[in-house]
Image: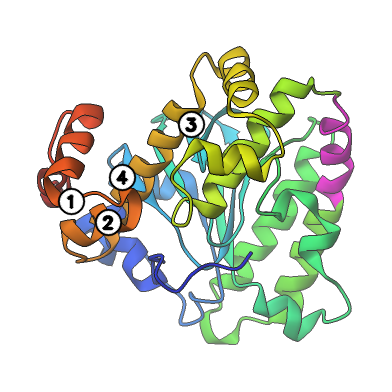
Amino acid sequence: MKISATIPIWELREMGNHHFGTNDSYFFKSQLHDLFHINKLEDYREKMSFPLPPHRKAVYDFLFLTKGTMQRSKSLNPYEMGENTFFFLPAYQITESEWMSEDIEGYFCHFNFEIFNAHLPQHNIVRDFSFLQFISDPIVEVNEATKPFIITILQRLELEYLKDKACDFNIVTAYLFALFTELNRFYDRSVLVKKNSALVITQLFKDALARFIYEKQKITEYADLLNISPNHLNKCTKATTGRLAQDLLYEMILLEAKVLLKQTDMPINEIAYKLTKQDHSNFTRFFKTHTGIKPLVYRNKT
């Protein structure tokens, strides 16, 4: 997935402050944190305040829940997940975390794709494992019989991470590859579900919004991209989401605006032009109409 250099990406050293604020120094970070990290969710949950603002980063990550529930989004698609569920987020994809139950247990892991290039160069993991792709269903559910094997792999990854500089990336990549191979069996079954045409078109539209929102801000442009009429696009989104295509377009603009407001010091008039081709005052009215607050107020909220 090619991302414009103008789109903000969190540096990993900034993510701790984003998730934990002043509690960031409480947590152990390996010197190899930018390449690989894993931790237990229950060790971090009490230090986090939800909802977390939308953001994107340059590494892949996944969550595995062994207890509790949470809601996280991938672009415009919200997902609620519970026990025995994985959620995968590819690099550069925008995400929000709405909430996480206080009894949550499980694992969070992020990794830089380059560790696979260095240690398993013969494999293209994004091609081999669909759940890592930019446009894919991020959810993989495993059964109780497989769960102990999954947890063993995650525990082994955690032990390796805690070695800090002595961490062996040959072991890390081998265990991650084994984990993904195990999950592929479940994912293949979960995606073999026949979808009706309206649902397929709606998802293609959402995917296109995630890719092209900085270039295209008109419904006619997206209809042309999908080779359908604007009226047919509206019928599809209305049938599957209860909302018109324009509503989803506005939602994507707001999501990107929130990222720009929180992750950059870009002037609001520049954000306004980048996302809506409008001036500061019109963009401020648009933002307040849909969120209840002005862009500057949102930027300054902690």
Single out the mark in the foreground, 4 or 1. 1
Circle 3: residue type: Met
Circle 4: residue type: Met
- Judging depth in this view, the residue of 14 and 206 nearest the camera is 206
In this picture, residue 158 sits left or right of residue 273: right
Q: Counting other residues with Cα less than 10 Å from the Cα at mark 3, is it few (<14), some (14-19), or many (20 or more)?
A: some
* Lower sequence index among marks 1 and 2: 2
Numbered range of the magenta stretch: 182-193
Q: Residue at horizontal 14%, vertical 50%?
A: 280
Callout 3: helix, strand or loop? strand
Q: Does 14 appear above or below 193?
A: below
Coordinates of residue 271 in the picture (x, y in percent):
25, 57
- Judging depth in this view, the residue of 43 and 22 nearest the camera is 22
* Lower sequence index among marks 4 and 1: 4
Coordinates of residue 209 in the picture (x, y in percent):
53, 44
For label 3, the residue is: 70
Image quadrant where residue 101 sits: top left
For label 4, the residue is: 48
* Lower sequence index among marks 4 and 2: 4
* Lower sequence index among marks 1 and 3: 3
Coordinates of residue 187 in the picture (x, y in percent):
82, 40
Residue 273 tag number = 2
Q: Are marks 3 and 4 in contact (CB under 8 Å)?
A: no
Image quadrant where residue 267 sits: bottom left
Circle 1: residue type: Asp
Single out the mark in the foreground, 1 or 3. 1
The Cα atoms of the two marked residues, 4 and 2, are separated by 33 Å
For label 1, the residue is: 279
* Lower sequence index among marks 2 and 3: 3
